Image: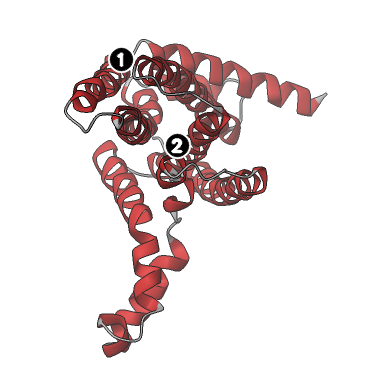
Amino acid sequence: MAKSAAAQRITAVAKNTFREAIRNRAFVGLTCFAVAFILFSLILSELTVVGQGPRVVVDFGLYAISLFAAATAILMGTLMVYKELEKKTIYTILSKPIRRYEFLLGKYFGMLGILMMELIVLGLIWGLVLWMQGGNFSGEHVKALVLIGFEASLVTAVGVMFSSQSTPALTGLFTLGVFVVGRIVYVLEEMLQGTKGLFVDSPLARLFGQGVTSIFPDLSVFNVSQQLLLDVTITWAYLGQAALYALSYGVIVIVIGILAFERRDFV
């Protein structure tokens, strides 16, 4: 019974967060920009060599969806918790029989809902543009969108973690930093495996590089644009491993956020 009541409270917060986010002008603006970027690939495809249009749409469209999904995750993760503090509604919410972890989880799941809706809309438009260029929207494209969803869920978790204990400016900065570093972690890993370079010549730099690759998530795991362009099959095993990776990292940062939020003083 207790578990059911907790689930109901989390669901109620998630639904309210979803409704707030869908009316948020920043979210609507980001989605419109994403649609414009995908449609812009039609113009770019006309400027390429004959027969290469679908490849341009695939590459540019996937890049745009990934970029704007991450931007939405960062923005919503930054604002959704802070808005409750700014409007002082957090005091009313927490005075009711709802625990802090339930509130934070509800916010997180609500933001996941808005991200999934955005990915579905952008995916449909991407598929339509690809069809207009004579390409085929296959199951591999759907898998690529699912992987973007995994990445966005992870970035959202990071945003929620920082927002539970920091200001919007710092939350946005830190979350953006994690995203940017996460996109280049694979480069650092390659440098660490090299036989020459900064990480070989400087023990301190090597220690720093190892620390970064150990702490930050490797977001290149969710980027399969090359596989799509080269018609390489994205296996279900790979999809499962990526899901487990995103889930594991996401759970860790959400737990950290909950622990920080439990100790936060709102007075």
Q: Is the residue 218 above or below the residue 126 in the image? A: below
> Residue at (59%, 16%) from the top-left corner?
12
User: In the image, residue 184 lies at what x, y percent?
Assistant: 33, 58
Q: What element carries label 2?
A: helix
Asked whether, in this view, residue 254 is left or right of residue 230, the answer is right
Q: Which of 22 and 61 is in front in this view?
A: 61
Q: What residue type is labelled 1?
A: Val
Q: How far apart are marks 2 and 1 (CA)?
A: 17 Å
> Residue at (54%, 23%) from the top-left corner?
95
Q: Is the residue 121 above or below the residue 164 in the image? A: above
> Residue at (57%, 43%) from the top-left corner?
234
What residue sits right under mark 2 in the picture? 152
What residue sits right under mark 1 in the picture? 28
> Residue at (27%, 89%) from the top-left corner?
201
User: In the image, residue 92 lies at what x, y percent?
Assistant: 48, 19
User: In the image, residue 49 lies at what x, y percent?
Assistant: 22, 33
Q: Which is nearer the N-term, disc 2 or disc 1?
A: 1
Q: Nearer the viewer, residue 118 or 232?
A: 232
Q: Which amino acid does label 2 sit on?
A: Ala
